[in-house]
Amino acid sequence: MIASGSVQADVTLLPALFVRNPGWWPTFDFDPEMAVQARRKVYDRLVAEKILLRGFHYPFPSLAHIEKSGMGYRETTAVESDDLNVCVEAAVHNGADIDQVRAGDQR
C-alpha cells in the first residue's frame, strides 16, 4: 500500500462521494461492511500520518491529502512541489517518458 512515502489506493473510487461519505459503498462491493472498515482504516492512517494519497480516480495530478471532516473526511488537493515530484517519479517508474511527463506539468 505504501510506496515512496505515498499511498496508492483504489479505496475511494469516486472521491467526491466516498471520501466524504466513507460509510457508503457501490453495489459491486463484494463485502460492503469490510469495504467500509477498510476505507475508514486507510483514511484514519492517512490523516494520522499525513500521508500523500495517489488516487486512481482523482483529478490531475491524482494527489491528495485526507483530513477529518464531520462524520467523514475531505480531500485537499493543494499540491506542493514535493508532491509533484512523487507523481513524476511514479509516472516514470510505471513506464512514462520523462519529457512527456514534464510537458504535462507545464500546461
Image (cartoon, rainbow, N blue to C red):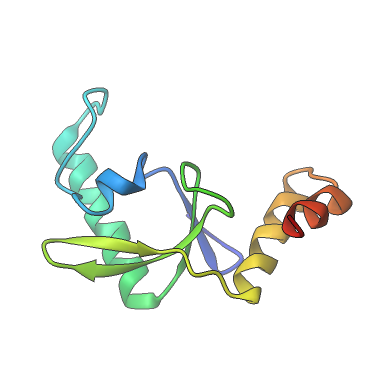
Q: Quadrant of the C terminus?
A: bottom right
Q: Residue at x 25, y 58 (%)?
A: 41
**Residue 83, position as x, y percentages in the image:** 60, 69
Q: Is residue 9 left or right of residue 21?
A: right
- Give the farthest residue toward the front: 107
Quarter-of-image position of residue 96: top right
Q: Residue at x 79, y 43 (%)?
A: 95
- Residue 13 against residue 43 in the figure, above or below: above
- Residue 32 against residue 105 in the figure, above or below: above
Please state the total of marks drawn on the protein image.
Answer: 0
Q: Residue at x 13, y 66 (%)?
A: 70
**Residue 21, position as x, y percentages in the image:** 18, 49
Q: Residue at x 57, y 51 (%)?
A: 60
- Residue 10 against residue 49 in the figure, above or below: above
Quarter-of-image position of residue 31: top left
- Residue 4 against residue 36 in the figure, above or below: below
Is residue 10 or residue 37 the one in the foreground?
10
- Give the farthest residue toward the right: 99
**Residue 69, position as x, y percentages in the image:** 19, 67
Q: Is residue 77 left or right of residue 90?
A: left
Is residue 104 or residue 95 the one in the foreground?
104
**Residue 33, position as x, y percentages in the image:** 14, 39
